[in-house]
Amino acid sequence: MGFGQAVKHVFSNYANFQGRASRSEFWWFYLFMIIVNVLLYIIYALLDLWGGTTESLSTQDIVGYILLGTWFLATIIPVIAVWVRRLHDSDKSGWWYLLVFACGIGGIVLLVFALLPGTPGPNKYGEGPATA
């Protein structure tokens, strides 16, 4: 699965917590998320520089917060859903995602789970992940 296919597949299944997600789908989507987040933070920084004041909340700050907050709210469900499907691919329950709330070590464990290959063939969460 390529970059565009992965992004399209995740957003078309934005609230689907069933099934499996391949490593390529997962990591291509995360690359997309990183690119968009960096661009939004650059826009926020430029708006903040344009505002020029650090003493009070400016209109530019508010616009930046609205951009970042809207993006966060629009992507929180797809991010959790692709994580759950990725965990399903390695035959683990989606509840493992709650490790994200464990300080430090939880994120490392989830990273390892995301890096590991999925189970070949069908598992209790469904057929192999979509490749197209």
Image: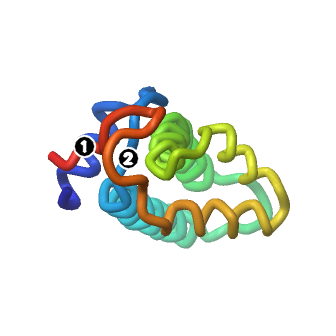
Query: Relative to 68, does residue 48 appear above or below in the rendering?
Result: below
- Mark 2 lies on residue: 21
**Residue at 61% over, 39% down:** 93
Q: Amino acid at mark 1?
A: Ala
Query: Which residue is found at the position 75% from the left and 60% from the top?
Result: 106
Could you say whether the residue bearing mark 1 is in a helix, strand or loop? loop
Q: Quadrant of residue 8?
A: top left
Furthest toward the left, the residue is: 132
Percent x, y for residue 56?
77, 57
Label 1 environment density (alpha carbons within 10 Å; few <14, some 14–19, many ≥20)? few
Gap in angstroms between the C-alphas marked 1 and 2 = 7 Å
| Front one among 50 and 36 | 36
Viewer-side residue, 3 vs 112: 112
Which residue is label 1 attached to? Answer: 130
Q: Residues within 10 Å of mark 2 (few under 14, many from 20)?
A: many
Is residue 71 visible in the rendered image? The answer is no
